[in-house]
């Protein structure tokens, strides 16, 4: 159904071996919420809080990848993917979540079938260990990520299970997806007494330490014999000052520290950003000397999720999660900085992504010669696509334009700036449940007819991405 316009794409401009594919997350696509022994995650709970999800839906069925995963593998092969990034549902493989709780072999079997099916089609699995769906029982037992002493040990055991059962075939591991967002979602209907003044910093601390412990475990016991790499994927958009004023420049820097540096500085530099230390004060938990030895350098690559750009106005506010600075997506004359998407926060601003890549290269990658950067998520939701017919949705010109612009910046970063970008995962393989927004935003390169058996339909953008990587990656 999708029609590719066949506009020119660059040839042989990305290094041989450049990996590319698509990303998903378990709760957003799998469904099968109570199938074969799976128990609830915190997202199952949140979806049952009245008014929590914009369209009143849940991931109970999602797009039913638990039963239709073979169709998804067929799509990946048709789209020319070399890799597929998906996450494991913790509560599917350890339904109660804890280190002494039983393993659900039915859940293990599902992921074995998925991994083996991918490999049979020449597609390498890239596994995200944790993509926001903490087992509900751990939230009830001790408050989940707020309780460092418990959750780090449970996460370590969970990671060990995955290394044991899948590590012979999985060679690219991501410990955490966007830890910056976990604290935000922990406050939404799950922790009635949640305090940004305390809990947000403790959750971040637990996440960083859990990541570092899993990486240390993998490097000590698995890396040599399994031959994989392991790291974290962080989310950040570029923040541009609205003018040359000191206030705007400081706020842009502060926003980057909050979104990226809060996690990247400890992991790659072995310290917190000065702004975080100064403004968090006693709210910021301290790592011991031994913990710092685990944290610093605890990533074999730099994983980056990035979608858009924001503009710092130079004004301040009281929102801790945003670094206490006001951001907009228009210039000082009120003009939008890019084509708007369905989600209010998303505009098509490829030039900002190039600036972010340069910033990351200078601040982090140059400290680790040879380290690669993987773009682990990037995508666009076309306005009102949820109200379109399948045929209209598949003619997703705006999404193709978005990918063309951002991928051209990737090529420029590699060719002109010498930045070691070595992989790109589009978000997402298919339209799915976009967390608090439900099924309203559509990020997929595949349309899904949820009213008729979750039938899949390739969109125009899927054809563009295949042509782009077939041409752009050197043989």
Image (cartoon, grey):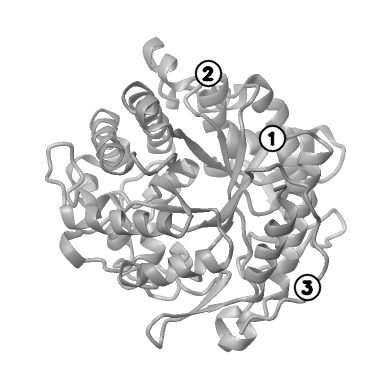
x, y percent for residue 17: 63, 43
The 10 Å Cα crowd at callout 3, few under 14, some 14 to 19, many 20 or more, is few
For residue 316, above or below residue 153: below
Question: Which numbered disc, 2 or 1, marks the residue closer to the eye?
Answer: 1
Residue wearing tag 1: 420
Q: Toward the viewer: 404 or 274?
A: 404
Residue wearing tag 3: 6
Number of callouts: 3
Q: Are the residues tagged 2 and 3 within 8 Å (C-beta)?
A: no
For residue 95, above or below residue 16: below
Distance, label 2 to label 3, CA atoms, is 47 Å
Q: Is residue 240 left or right of residue 274?
A: right
Question: Which numbered disc, 2 or 3, marks the residue closer to the eye?
Answer: 3
Q: Is residue 128 left or right of residue 217?
A: right
x, y percent for residue 170: 39, 43
The 10 Å Cα crowd at callout 1, few under 14, some 14 to 19, many 20 or more, is many
Distance, label 3 to label 1, CA atoms, is 28 Å
Distance, label 2 to label 1, CA atoms, is 22 Å
The structure residue drawn at horizontal position 29% and vertical position 54%, both measured from the top left corner, is 112
Residue 313 appears in view = no
For mark 2, give the secondary structure.
loop
The structure residue drawn at horizontal position 61% and vertical position 76%, both measured from the top left corner, is 459
Residue wearing tag 2: 270
For mark 3, give the secondary structure.
loop
x, y percent for residue 295: 44, 22
Question: Which numbered disc, 3 or 1, marks the residue closer to the eye?
Answer: 3
The 10 Å Cα crowd at callout 2, few under 14, some 14 to 19, many 20 or more, is some
Q: Is residue 309 left or right of residue 214?
A: right
Q: Earlier in the sequence, mark 2 or mark 1?
A: 2
Extreme residue toward the top, this view: 289
**Mark drawn on residue 434:** none
Q: Toward the viewer: 332 or 235?
A: 235
């Amino acid at each position: 159904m999708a029609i590719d316009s066949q506009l020119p794409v660059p040839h042989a401009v990305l290094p041989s071996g450049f990996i590319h594919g698509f990303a998903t997350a378990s709760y957003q696509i799998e469904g099968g919420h109570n199938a074969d022994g799976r128990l609830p995650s915190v997202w199952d709970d949140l979806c049952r809080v009245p008014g929590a999800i914009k369209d009143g839906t849940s991931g109970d069925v999602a797009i039913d990848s638990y039963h239709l995963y073979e169709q998804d593998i067929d799509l990946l092969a048709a789209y020319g993917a070399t890799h597929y990034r998906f996450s494991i549902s913790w509560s599917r493989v350890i339904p109660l979540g804890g280190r002494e709780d039983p393993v659900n072999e039915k859940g293990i079997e599902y992921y074995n079938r998925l991994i083996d099916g991918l490999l049979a089609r020449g597609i390498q699995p890239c596994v995200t260990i944790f993509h926001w769906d903490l087992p509900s029982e751990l939230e009830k037992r001790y408050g989940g990520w707020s309780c460092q002493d418990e959750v780090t040990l449970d996460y370590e055991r969970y990671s060990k299970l995955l290394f044991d059962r899948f590590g012979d075939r999985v060679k690219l591991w991501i410990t955490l997806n966007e830890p910056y967002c976990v604290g935000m979602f922990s406050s939404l209907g799950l922790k009635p007494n949640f305090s940004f003044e305390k809990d947000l910093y403790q959750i971040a601390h637990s996440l960083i330490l859990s990541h570092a412990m899993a990486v240390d475990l993998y490097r000590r016991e698995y890396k040599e014999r399994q031959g994989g790499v392991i790291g974290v994927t962080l989310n950040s958009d570029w923040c541009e000052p609205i003018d040359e004023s000191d206030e705007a420049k400081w706020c842009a820097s502060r926003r980057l520290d909050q979104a990226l540096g809060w996690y990247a500085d400890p992991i790659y530099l072995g310290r917190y950003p000065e702004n975080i230390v100064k403004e968090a004060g006693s709210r910021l938990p301290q790592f011991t000397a031994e913990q710092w030895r685990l944290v610093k350098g605890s990533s074999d690559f730099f994983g980056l999720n990035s979608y858009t750009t924001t503009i710092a106005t130079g004004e301040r506010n009281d929102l801790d999660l945003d670094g206490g600075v006001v951001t907009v997506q228009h210039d000082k004359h009120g003009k939008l900085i890019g084509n708007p998407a369905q989600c209010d926060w998303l505009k098509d601003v490829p030039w900002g992504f190039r600036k972010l890549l340069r910033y990351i290269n200078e601040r982090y990658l140059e400290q680790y010669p040879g380290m690669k950067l993987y773009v682990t998520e990037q995508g666009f939701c076309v306005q009102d696509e949820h109200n379109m017919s399948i045929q209209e949705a598949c003619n997703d010109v705006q999404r193709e334009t978005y990918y063309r612009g951002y991928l051209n910046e990737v090529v420029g970063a590699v060719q002109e700036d010498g930045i070691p970008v070595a992989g790109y995962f589009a978000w997402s393989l298919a339209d799915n449940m976009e967390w608090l927004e439900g099924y309203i935003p559509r990020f997929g390169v595949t349309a899904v007819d949820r009213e008729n058996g979750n039938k899949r339909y390739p969109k125009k953008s899927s054809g563009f991405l295949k042509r782009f990587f077939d041409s752009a990656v050197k043989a």
